Image (tube, rainbow, N blue to C red):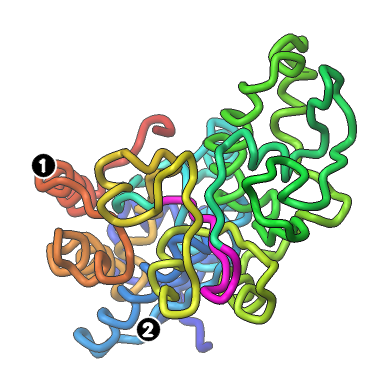
Amino acid sequence: MKNTLIAGLALGTALALVGHAGAQSRDQIQIVGSSTVFPYTQAVVEQFANESGMAAPVLESTGTGGGMQIFCGGVGAQTPDITGASRAMTESEWELCKTNGVTNVTEILLGYDALSLASARSGADLSVTKAQLFQALAGEVEVDGEIVPNPYENWSQIDSSLPDQPILVYGPPPTSGTRDAWVELVMEEGCEAFPAIEALEDDRKEEVCQRMRTDGPFVEAGENDNLIVQRLTSDDNAVGIFGYSFLFENQDTLKGAAIDGVQPSEETVASGEYAVSRPLFIYIKNDHRQAIPGLEEFVAEYVSDEALATGGYLEERGLVPLSEEELKKVQETATAGTAMENPS
């Protein structure tokens, strides 16, 4: 890619960029971050390129945590302009950003997604509680009042109502926001059902409730959720954890599992009945807005009614949209480039 010296910037932006050694401009927007946000951003990339005739942004799926590390690495053309996140930026990530001079950042709430547990349509139906999922996936569990290494190898060993098949769950690695959300919304809540775990001291309880098993039944499958989808369609025993959008896009070959008696759907996620949902975000480096061609226009496309509103093309991809009032606030924030003061 041909690089040219930054010129014609507003003074504040120029100072911010030139203050970093070797900062040069480029002709393509660079975006990193969450694998869950990836398909939504990809749709905006396609729409932007088709409508504007400008170069399509370069989009990389790095996971939420990995994207934050890269995004917060500094200001300048050697760093990305936007990162996607399936959770809000953490305080430690914000401190990293500030340490590296990334202090002018706009946080955009896109809408809502759910965590889904899915399998091939040809596989067994699965309806599980959060407590049963904890028993299936935790490194340590409670058995007869004792905390022991997880002994469960089959779903039916946990409860006779569950399928008599091996526990084989493909899921995200620790760098993924999906993993963070799964631990918070499923594992930590599921472990509350077990008195011996609840009685542990705080640090030990946190360790038991959060640590996923590493003995085989849970497999870290990387940041590419499409690879999980491929594995599910080739193995009827396999189950996958990913954002609802991937289940939505692959519902011809996959089916969702009910969690606590509720199936994932746009309606149950929007209503809150399906209690494994989370907000999705993008973060924009405002010091790049005037330096990188098309960045302002791309942000405008991302928050447009055509993309984010009810009936927009991102809802068609599985995003649960914001209310009209929420969307209006988001659009005003994005247009003004309002800088966040602290993480949400």
Q: Quadrant of the C terminus?
A: top left
According to the image, label 2 marks what residue? 56
- The vertical placement of 53 against 99, above or below, is below
Left or right relative to 321: residue 136: right
Left or right relative to 79: residue 221: right
Number of marks in the rendered image: 2
Where is residue 300 drawn, in percent x and y? 20, 64
Where is residue 101 drawn, in percent x and y? 52, 44
Name the residue rendered at 25%, 49% in the picture.
337
Q: Which residues are magenta?
A: 114-124
**231 or 221, which lies in front?**
231
Q: Secondary structure at mark 1?
A: helix
**139 or 82, which lies in front?**
139
Q: Label 2 amino acid?
A: Ala
- The vertical placement of 153 against 276, above or below, is below
- The vertical placement of 343 against 137, above or below, is above
Name the residue rendered at 54%, 61% in the picture.
125
Which quarter of the figure has residue 96? top right
**Overall secondary structure of the magenta stretch?**
strand
Q: Tell me if I can see residue 99 in this picture.
A: no
Left or right relative to 167: residue 96: left
According to the image, label 1 marks what residue? 325
Q: Label 1 amino acid?
A: Glu
The verdict on residue 117 being magenta is yes
Where is residue 314 drawn, in percent x and y? 27, 67
